[in-house]
Image (cartoon, helix red, strand yellow):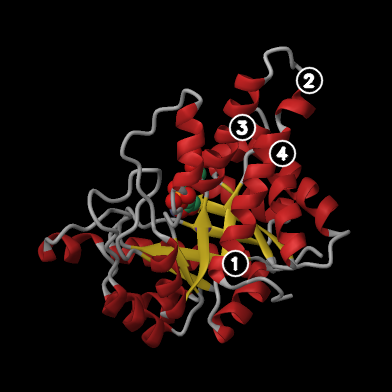
Amino acid sequence: SYVNTREILDKASKEYYGVAAFNINNLEFLQAILAGAAEKKSPAIIETSEGAIKYAGMGDYFKGARIFVNMVKEFANDLDIPVALHLDHGKDFNIIMACIKAGYSSVMIDASHYDFEDNLRITKDVARIAHAAGVSVEAELGQLAGIEDNVEAAENVLVNVDQAEKFCAESEIDFFAPAIGTSHGAFKFKGEAKLDYDRLKKVKEITGKPLVLHGASSVVQEYVKIAEEHGADFGGSKGVPSDVLKETVKFGINKVNTDTDLRIAYIAGLREYLDNDSKQFDPRKYYKVAMDYTKQVVMDRIDILGSAGKI
Ligand code: G3H
Ligand code: 13P
Ligand code: NA
Ligand code: ZN
């Protein structure tokens, strides 16, 4: 069934497990994700970036938002797992409004690039409007950037605990994304994955909110290898290892944003298939292995985060 994202994340926060939020741009990724989640009897959060919405609507973001709502609802209505649709990194007020109007389950207002007071003010405004429409809200504090051993740099980019307390108390958001050292994409860390667990624990304690980890892909080497055997070049890619993800969940992370891992699994399957069958030109056939690998990554994540059976 199609649900408010808050339902999924309030339960996850109470019971200390993580639910992956999977980014999509098209029908095939949605099908692969929902097949994996249904098989694991896991709640599923589907999310789309502003770019995904413009892509789907061929530039018309009202159309793009409706396309995703209709597509997700059409499948969700027939499934016995909770399924939510979320706007990821909403920065454009008009696109946020388009998503609320189209029937998204939740929106992220990402004003994390503004200073604290502006971020808080903008987030408050969006939360008021979204809540009036029954849509839940995510917001972020800090910058998504890796931290090395430089304490001063960490203070500048990571979430500030006192600000997190004030932000969550005053903004009425439903879930909170604290920057603790991850970044987007396939190249997150130079050496060891390094996240600030102490900061995370304090933020959980002081806010009591369901927490969101952005840039949470593991960059699964099994699929990097397959892709690279078939012509890809992701030299030196590195993500958040699964044991590190488990630690973050233990300390209060509940929504685990995942885009890169799906893209890598998909391209691995697509490259492998095309390399092995030069005569094929039916997309329903040549997408098959890509979708199978994507589904496998989804199911593995669900096991790592502990959301299997949590419906
Ligand atoms: O947060 C970024 C997501 O991975 C989506 O990125 O803007 O390429 O769709 P995108
Ligand atoms: P990854 O690039 O690690 O998959 O992060 C995705 C994300 O944070 C989307 O908001
Ligand atoms: Na998000
Ligand atoms: Zn993100």
- Place residue 285 in its image quadrant: top right
Q: Amino acid at mark 1?
A: Asp
- Residue 75, how many percent across, how many down? 83, 52
Q: Residues within 10 Å of mark 4 (few under 14, many from 20)?
A: some
- Closer to the camera, 284 or 62? 284
Question: Of the residues tagged 2 and 3, which is closer to the observer?
Answer: 2
Mark 4: is the Cβ under 8 angstroms from ligand 1?
no
- Residue 102 appears in the rendering: yes
Instruction: Tell me the number on the disc at residue 55.
Output: 3
Residue 110 x %, y %:
44, 56
- Residue depicted at 42% across the width and 54% down the height: 215
In the picture, the disc for residue 282 is 2
Q: Is mark 3 within 8 Å of ligand 1?
A: yes
Q: Residues within 10 Å of mark 2 (few under 14, many from 20)?
A: few
Mark 2 or mark 3: name the one nearer the start of the chain. Answer: 3
- Give left or right: position of 51 versus 111: right
Residue farthest to the right, as pictured? 78
Of callouts 3 and 1, the N-terminal one: 3
In the displayed structure, would residue 298 be above or below residue 230?
below
Element carrying mark 1: helix
Residue to which mark 1 is pinned: 303
Left or right: residue 74 versus residue 67 is: right
Tell me which numbered mark, 2 or 1, is placed earlier along the sequence.
2
Q: Secondary structure at mark 2?
A: loop
Q: In the rendered structure, which amino acid carries the disc numbered 4? A: Glu
